[in-house]
Image (cartoon, rainbow, N blue to C red):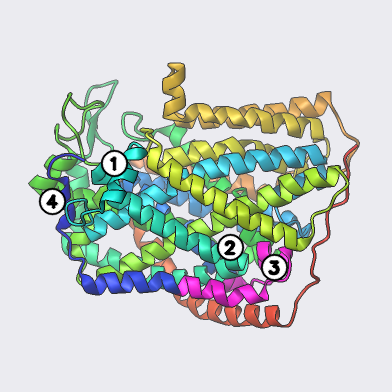
Amino acid sequence: MPPGAADALRETNFTTIDWVIVIAYPLISLGIGLYVARFIRNMNDFVVAGHRLGVCLGIATMTGTELGLITVMYNAQKGFTGGFAAFHIALAAGLVTFVVGVTGFLVYRLREMQVLTIPEFYERRFDRKTRILGGIMMAFGGILNMGLFLKVGSMFIVGITGLSAESWAPPDVVISAVDAIGLSVESWPLAAVMVFLITLVLAYTCLGGMVSVVIADYVQFVVLSLGLLLTSFLAVESLGWTNIFDSVDKHMVVVDSVDKQPVKSGFDPTIAEGDFGWEYIIWMGFVGLVSCGIWPTSVARALAMDSPNAVKRQYMFGSISYLIRFLIPCFWGICAYVFIMQDESLKQLFFPSGYPPPESLPEGVEAMDNLYAMPVFLGRILPVGIIGIISAGMIAAFMSTHDSYLLCWSSVLTQDVVAPICKSFGRDLKPKTRITLSRVFIVLVGLYVLYWGLLYKGEDDIWDYMAVTGAIYFTGAFALLLGGLYWKGASSGGAFLALLVGSMAVLGLSPVQDFLGIEIASAWVGLTSIGATLAAMIVGSICFPDRRTSTTWLARWITIACLVLGCCFVWVAVLDAWECLWMVVLIGGVGLFAVLAIVVTFGGFFDVVKLIKSLREGGESDSPQEPQDQSR
């Protein structure tokens, strides 16, 4: 950290009262894990909660998973660097999720097939080797994707609480351990918070599986919904509604590369000289589809719903949450930017070479990581007690994301890699063995996340890092799901080839590009990967056909929605009405979310009661049916 950063972090309203709130809250999640562990009888209960989730509880747990602390941090970072123009990410996510809910695109048929995981669908539609490769690619991309969750979440806690090496002197044994792994002593509070959080998450996730996850997510939804709305109100009250927009309008300006005139990049996402551009907007539209309809942690919630029609309702109403998960944290980042630009000491820390910052800082000059901007801002404006509740809500968000991801990747490794391999050798894994193996994988993945978070030194924005690492899995998965569900000519040969081609997305990571000596925008890498996997699916299926039957082509609603969205963006771009658009999106999105929060809070409570009652009574049979072997 640059000189003065520790002093800036210590200027927070966080007190002992807030520490009590923050420490007490995670113990609730641990208690949930201990309580529901007694109801877990088989892998069906452990992975998808016995397919017993009601709509409200499904919305709550989907929101709890997708609105994690990592989500809050990377969206705040996008708002801090891109201004209101970053709202296009939120708008795309909300609209795409709603379209998926209306049409049931992908998720309806997956739930109708009653599969536990996406790779299980690969085996039913294609063959076992495709399932195994798909499981490996999913786990690899997903585990790499969550590699920075722990570090970024811990940075929030350090930033908002004021922890630093100077304010909390570590024991000698800690200094030795930190030095041994190549970290500076100043970073030890961050490492300590990371170890504590991952230990807590591993404990209750291993105990209760999906049941403990969804109930913890419900509690997190209630706390975080209140926190999001209250914090947004206090941020506006502190800075002033007009001042926020005027500051972005004044400072976020870039020079047009053609006519050399200044243009306002803080509102218009189509400006190529800003942080985005048209290729980035298109990439975000696809990522929005992936995050709700293909990403395993979201699809796991759809597969746990009590009926296919409930899945469609879950996505239609949950689209508000997908909008908000980007919108409000991004707004917090914008507020943090305005706050810092009006405070000379903080401005010097975050922009030591002036604003806009140069592409590379002069030698010997170090800027404070902009991930600290939002927590530093909240630490200074939130009053005592409220800051504790907000921090507890953020920790809840952190835990709900980690538990879902740990459960998802461990289940994939067990169900879709180890179990099919064992079955190929004539040995079936018993339900108890599968649960034990999943718990072992949970611990191993957790240890990797701790290691990767401490040592990764990439320069990517967190959101771009996640989009690229996720693309290692989802570009191939999109081709397989699209072809497998909607094209009768899709074959196992094409599916296998598409999965392999999808791995080219790793070229979007900055360490990989530095190693190869290339420089390509991550959006272009992602879009190219999508095109390449679709082409591989088509070419592979034509060259290596299967004799199979399939279903109909894409629903017409997808095309209509894309046309409407495109027309809206063209209209706004022509009239240059971006500021007005984002103001309407912000007010409308927050208002809808406030209504949703009330409905889901009460409806989710009754769903939790119903879920516990169903588990007590035994529910479904003790072992899910294995898919029939269709490998040739």
In the displayed structure, would residue 377 be above or below residue 383? above
Q: Residue drawn at (58%, 27%), measured in percent from left and top? A: 504
Q: Nearer the viewer, mark 3 or mark 1?
A: 3
Q: Residue drawn at (45%, 56%), measured in percent from left and top? A: 198
Query: Whole-Å distance between the Cαs marked 1 and 2?
Result: 38 Å
What's the amino acid at mark 4? Asp
Q: Earlier in the sequence, mark 2 or mark 3?
A: 3
Query: Whole-Å distance between the Cαs marked 3 and 1?
Result: 43 Å
Q: Which residues are magenta?
A: 28-57
> Tag 1's secondary structure?
helix
Which dot marks residue 613? none
- The answer to which image quadrant residue 16 occupies is bottom left
> Tag 3's secondary structure?
helix
Can you identify the residue that label 4 sits on?
A: 7
Q: Nearer the viewer, mark 1 or mark 4?
A: 4
What's the amino acid at mark 1? Thr
Can you identify the residue that label 3 sits on?
A: 45
Q: Residue drawn at (45%, 77%), measured in percent from left and top? A: 598
What's the amino acid at mark 2? Cys
Can you identify the residue that label 1 sits on?
A: 81
Can you identify the residue that label 2 sits on?
A: 206
Q: Quadrant of the C terminus?
A: top right
Query: Whole-Å distance between the Cαs marked 4 and 3?
Result: 49 Å
Is the C-beta separation of discs 2 and 3 under 8 Å? no
Is there any visible trace of residue 465 in the rendered image?
yes
